[in-house]
Image (tube, helix red, strand yellow):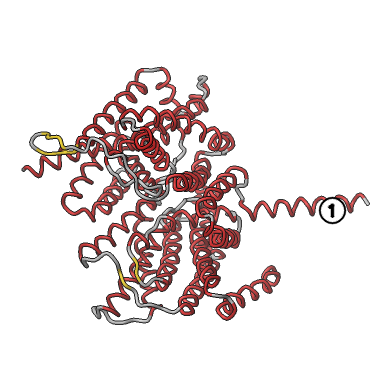
Amino acid sequence: MRMMNILPILVIVLAFIFLAPFFLDVYNLGVLRETLMWAALTASWFFFSGLTKYISLGSAAFFGTGLYFTALYLEQSIFLKNLPALPLPIIVVMAGLLNFAIALAIGLISLRLKGIYFAIATLALGIACQGVFNYIVSDIMKTYYTHIPPFDLQTTYYTIAIAALVIFIIIYTLYRSNLGFALRMIGENEDAAIHFGVNASLTKTIGFALSAMCIGLMGGCYTTIFTVTAPTIAFNLQFSFMPPMMAMFGGLVTFYSPIIGAVILSVLRNYLGITFVHHFLIVLGIIIVIIAEFMPEGIVGFVRKIVRKLTMRSLKESEKR
Amino acid sequence: MARLLDIAIGGVLFGALYALIAVGLNLQYGVTRILNLAYGEILLIGSYITYIFFKDFRINPLLTLIFSGLVTSVLGILIHVITFRRLVLSAASAEELEFRSLFVCFGLILLIQNLLAHIFGVTPIGTPYLMEGVEIFGERFKMNTVVAAILSAVVNAIMYTLLRFTKFGLAMRATAEEPVGAQIIGINILKIHIASFSVGCLTAALAGSMISMIYSNVTPYTGTIYTVIALIILVLGGRGSFIGSIVGGLIIGCAYYAMIRVRASLADPVIYILLIIMLLVRPRGLFGRQ
């Protein structure tokens, strides 16, 4: 029944996303593409870290691995003919599975431990993965850049839009599944979850690997916007820091609140952040601190609270009459 | 043989610098349980203060250590009082404190990075000083790395005396080990937290000043790398362990220096493998308590 309430909004948003190339100009379409990318990353991050409260700072590692694996494969198969040419979706799925495997290994080791070890292990993973790809590019292939065959704007837009929608569907299904429920239990109280028969470390590891896989899928699709890329671009640490910030901005409340946060911040970043680069980010930093201090439920939680207060007040007034 | 000697001495010099980088974070995390991800950015503030005084006033970079130390220790107090104090007072558990303070750190990272970028621009800066070579056992090293190692030894010795032989240090150790017990016997925990946060920022700034002397590639965005190095040393040495941060720093320094000599591009992955092995075998670190 709640599905019926948001169905019209969902249809409008979907129609907007799919018809956007027909009425948006190049710049705005680029902004929309970027926004979809960030929203998908934030949703994937939220699925694991938002639910379990184990903060992953490894989004850059998975995004970069997905992006660079796809870039290398495209270069090898199309320009150098060393590998058989495959359609893009298959390469991207391979990149996602690679990420799944990496995250499974890292998760098995670092998620057994409570506390900050997970954050440290994932943050350092980004730099380690960048090192590995740097080694492949500079020492094995003796170059600095990787060339990618150019795609036109519409193709890249639809690739990223479809990938984002697929990721939203995957994440939403997982969020509503038993796995999502178990992850949320772990986030609320890990000992109680174990007591109720949840295999905590296995659940955490699989949740983390699935979230990493989705981030990798998006990374693979994001390759299409480049014609030349380098490990420093692919593994930029903003990919690690932005998704948690966007999710926190929106609020770690429900499935859609991190996405709302990502959309707001990404749009602001692309319109205000272009003209006032540093000013915008300075103000954003202050806002993030304020939200972490005073509104642990984010923008969505704040709006909800105000709405609840207003309805309570109007109820009281109608009672008085 | 000559190469081995070079790696051994260079590794120790490098490791001493790393120990200086790590000691502040270890103190901050050990005592306050706040994982200060903005540590590298505070370190950069030290670098930039040295840079201003060197470029505009032509003051010897070694003298600017006083300024960078003073400014960042005050800044550390301000940051703690304005942001983390509320969290320490309101958080229900240590886990919640860690979780929420991470987000405050995200904000601080953005804030400091972009303030620095706005004021100084994004071109790499540095204060090259004491670049001439010095010979140790027939191997040549840069003078400033030796100075940094000496500074690290001095700072670590001061920290050790502070923690070991003063009442204040005793209170710090008590707060780190048993916060509730410390409160019961009348230690003002909040004061201790602020003090250790401030001292951590001070040593970070000293490390930052040394870094701007040794490498001339400081940009507002290089801070996170030093945070990661300090975090890896924190895990390796054991959280809250003073000896651990020195030994961890030396190990990471030697491994890093050796990898740079053998195959520089694989240095980061090798350090990461060290971290993973440590997490597998002994998660509490070399000198950490259970």
The chain carrying label 1 is A
Identified at 25% across, 43% down, the residue is B252
Q: Can you give x and y, in whole percent of width and height, for residue B272 in the image?
A: 29, 51
- In this image, B71 relative to A169: left or right? left
- In this image, B209 relative to A299: left or right? left
Query: In terms of image quadrants, where is residue A32?
Result: bottom right
Element carrying mark 1: helix
Query: In terms of image quadrants, where is residue A175?
Result: bottom right
Q: Can you give x and y, in whole percent of width and height, for residue A212 in the image?
A: 42, 62
Q: Is residue A76 visible?
A: yes
Identified at 55% across, 50% down, the residue is A284
Image: A85 above or below B160 = below
Identified at 21% across, 42% down, the residue is B254
Q: Amino acid at mark 1?
A: Leu
Residue wearing tag 1: A315
- How many marks the image carries: the answer is 1
Q: Can you give x and y, in whole percent of width and height, for residue B35 in the image?
A: 44, 41
